[in-house]
Structures are given as structure tokens and as C-alpha cells.
Image (spheres, grey):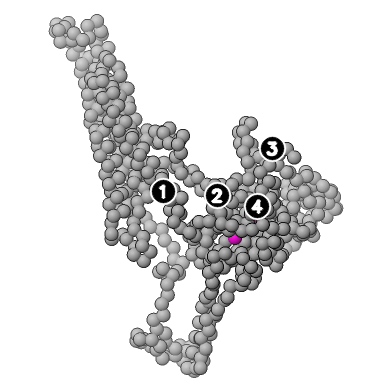
Amino acid sequence: MDSHSVPVAPKATSNQACGIPVPVGPKVLLQSCQQQAVPEAPCVPYGVVICPGSASFPHGPETVAQRWLMAQRLAAFPDFTWEVKANDRAYHKQFKKRVAFCLTRKKYEDNTIKTAKYNALTFLPLNLYEQFHRLANLYFLFVILLQTVPEISTLPWFTLLLPLSCLLLLRGLRDLIDDIVSSPSVHWAGNPRRGPVGLFFSCSFSWKKWRDICVGDIICLRKDSFVPADLLLLSSSEPSSLCYVETADIDGETNLKFRQALLATHQELVSEASMAAFDGKVTCEEPNSRMHSFIGTLEWRGEKYSLDTEKILLRGCRIRNTETCYGLVIYAGLDSKIMKNCGKIKMKKTKLDRLMDRLVILIFVMLVITSFCLAFAAGFWAVKFQVEHSYLSSLYVGTSPAEQAFFTFWGFMILLSIIIPMSMYITFEFVYMVNSYFIDWDLEMYYPAKDMPAKARSTSLNDQLGQIEYIFSDKTGTLTQNIMTFKKCCINGIIYGTSEWKQVSMGSWGRLTLKSCEVSLAQRLAFCSVSFLAQWDPEPWRGPLGATTVQIIVMSYK
């Protein structure tokens, strides 16, 4: 197989479901089925999938209407050309994709992600490009260029280049420190939950770093750990192969969501030997940014199983209330859905920076007007008095009044350029840096419960603190800190607790007996309060997959 080619499904095949030869493909299938009458039919489930290149649809619809609806749905999605083979790294390494012209790169990304803004090669040009987006730096550079002209220069040009270089150096070092401090590797270095994961390699699990994960690997995740890549859930320690995840880092929701593996993989993949023999093949859509959409199929042992979002663990999720779970890497690194949703890093300007840019424009316009007026006056003086008082204009011997006015204009531009002081911007850099240290040292912002002090991850946005104009909020019914402590309750007028309660109306409770009221409360507490008990196992893959004990808190009336 050519290393630069990608497997593509056959263009067409024969299928008699519509009574005519129908090519396999959403667009052609849609055109073919539109020629026939489409009767009323129930909607096709979202998980219905066509396997590319297949002449039959084992899990597909039977009627023309269902085929038409399915073709409409698949026409909105890209071709299913993303193929993942379990426990086969060599298979994925042979595929390449074209980047530009004759340049190619590997199709399947590894799990290495670099979120740093600069590197050794791009720091100098990129930082200078960003710094000269500040109008003040362009203004100072413009003045230095004027100083290089001997006819209008007042000082050697390098006398202004030195302070400008110091200003650029200070800002560049500050940007570099911010980039290093804000790097995820710094924040995650001491966090074991974002640390090594159990990677299945050479017929056994071993602890590996996130960057060692590749597409097609089988990994083991334990409770409270973060998902390192987009995974297909294969099995878990729960009896029904459920896996509870928290997506707070993705969508901000703290409520738990559950994912469930296929019954076939949950029952078969129960040991290291069975996982080593697992050779399933996943065919799905290309990497995309749709967080709540996934369509694919798993082909294993001659059977095909449809896949949807309920069987996928996204990178950034956190495993909750599940002892262990096992997954097959589908998308890794920059191909993961959360990274596809990350936009490009943009230059940030504070309100103070934008205000300073506007002031620089205003002052520069005033400087040009003032210099023009002075140059006009110099030209008028040359016309009136140059002949009579030639000794006063010895520098402009042999020049016309217009030429004298021209040179005078640029001369005054240099003389009056100090109206925008460069020292003020150098002072700003020191103020920003020192102020960030004061934020780090502020004991009033220390959180003793988690031993977490305040940390200024950016030293260039300090003046943005407190600059809030609008607050958009919604009411979701979530209690503060999600902590609810029992204080008191009143059952049919009888208070249980230490606080007093003033009865206003008996309402419907007045028709119930005391015993029935207490039983009703006990039933609601029993079915609305669920806790999960789990035991910590440093090597969860040793031995058979155990089930997490689930205990329901039951209050009974005696």
C-alpha cells in the first residue's frame, strides 16, 4: 500500500433495496431515493450508520423512506475514512496526509500537545511582531529613523535605540515568563490525576505519560483521573459497564454523566489476555469539533456494532464513581474534539493599552500640526528676511524657502518628540511585574481549605481586574458549593431538629396521619439519596474486573 494514500471506500455498488442500482454514498443515495415516492415513516434513530464501501446495510433501514432520511443525515457529515485498529501501531504509522504542495505529515496524531505561545525559533520574530503592534513602539522607531538623517538629526540615532531596546527586552522577558508560567505542564506537574495512565503494551499494562499514547492503544483509567484522549469505552468495573464522568473542564457542568460500553466488549474484555487478542476495527468520521456528535461502527469477530456519543469518553473528562475503566484511543492530541474547539491564540490588549494607543494617535496629530505651523512660519520668515539677514540662515545657503520649511518641519518633529516619554513605558513594565508579585503575596486571597494561594498567571492584564461592566447569569437551581446540610424538617406539624418552625397552613398534609407522613418522607429520602462506595486499587488491571459496591441509603420508620 502506498504510504501516501488513504483507504477510500468504493465509489459505487449494487443494492436492490430501492429497486434500482444505488451507489453507496450519502449524496448519490439521496438523489436516487428522491426519484421515488417517500411515504410517511417513523424517524430513523440517530445511531443508524452506513459502513463505507459496504453493499448491504445490516443495521440500516428497510423502507425507502428510512433510506431517504438516513441519506439526508449522512449527507451532513464527512466521509467515514477514519479507521482505527486496536493494538496495531504499525497500521496507523503508514498513513500520511498532504499539508502543502509536496509536504506531508502523519495522518494520525500522537498525544503530544504544545500549547506554549513561543518556542526557541519563533520567540524573537513573533514577540517583536506583537510589540510593534503597540503604537508607542512604532512612534519611537519612527523617531529613530528620522535621527538617521544628518540634515535634521539632533542626536546620534543610537542614543535613542538603546532605551527602545531596553523597553523591548523588558517586555519580551515578561511575555516569556508568562508563557512559561501559564504552560499546562507547570500546573499539572504535581497533579497525579493528570499524571501517568495505564497503557496496554506488550501484553501488559504499565504506567506511561500522556505523550506516549497513540491512536489504537488500550488504556486503563482509575477513579478521579482525567481522560487523556478521546476514547471508545470498552469495559468498566461497574456491573452494567457504566462509567460516570464529570465534564466540568469541557462545558462547566458539575453534574455527572454516564457512558456505557458495548455489551460484547464488556463481557469479553475481562483480562489482559483478552485485551491483547482484541483486534476490533473502528470506522468513524474524521476528527471534528462537534462535541456532542459521534457516528461510527465497531467491526469485531464478523459483527458490526453502531457507536454514538454515549460510548465515547472525551479528552478532559474526569472519571467519577467508577473504580476502573478501559478505553480504545480514537482521536489523540490535536485531533481530539476539545483541541479542535480551541481557537488560535490572539493578542490581548487591556483597556489601558487601548487608551494609550488612542492618546498616542491624538498626540501625534497635535505634533504634526504644531510642526507644520512652525515650518510654515519658518518658510514665511525665509521669504521676508533671508535676503536682508543672510547671516541668520547660513545653514540654508542656496536653498529655497520651501526647502527650508521642509527641513524645519522634520526638525521640529524630532525636537518635540519627547512629548511622548519613553521612560513612562519602561516604568509601566516594572509596575506590571511588581504588581503581579503583590497579588501572589496577598494573604487575604489565600484559600486554606485547599492550601491554594493567589497566582497571577499573566503580568500584563493586571489593570483589567475589577473592570466589569455587565454580568450575565442564569439560575440553574444549584446550591452554593453544591453542599446541603440537614438543619430541620417538619412533618405534619411536628418539628424534627433544633430550630423552630411556625406553621401557616396544614394544606394536604392535614388529611394524612403522622405515621404516613413520616413513611412518605423516609421513602423520598431513600430513593433520592444515593452514594457510591469504592476501594482504591493502585493496579486495578491485576485480576478480574471487580464490581463497585453501590449502597442506597434507606431510612425506615419503626
The residue wearing badge 2 is: 211
Tag 4: amino acid: Gly
Give the vertical position of 528 relative to 197 (above or below). Answer: below
Q: Using the rendered image of the protein, determine whether residue 453 is visible from the camera's viewpoint.
A: yes
Marks 4/1 in contact by CB < 8 Å: the verdict is no
**Which comes before the other along the chain, label 1 or label 2?**
1
Q: Residue visible at 59% across and 57% down?
A: 206
Three-letter amino acid code of the residue under disc 2: Arg
Q: CA distance from mark 1 to mark 2?
A: 19 Å
Quadrant of res 442: bottom left
Q: Residue 382: within the magenta?
A: no
Q: Return the x and y of residue 438 as percentages of the image width and height.
A: 27, 52
Q: Which residue is mark 4?
A: 216
- Magenta residues span 216-220
Q: CA distance from mark 4 to mark 1?
A: 31 Å
Q: Earlier in the sequence, mark 3 or mark 2?
A: 3
Q: How many marks?
A: 4
Task: Identify the residue under disc 3.
Answer: 4
Query: Is 217 included in the stretch rendered in magenta?
Result: yes
The residue tagged 1 is: 182
Q: Which image quadrant for residue 532? A: bottom right
Residue, x 22% and y 9% (percent of image)?
A: 396
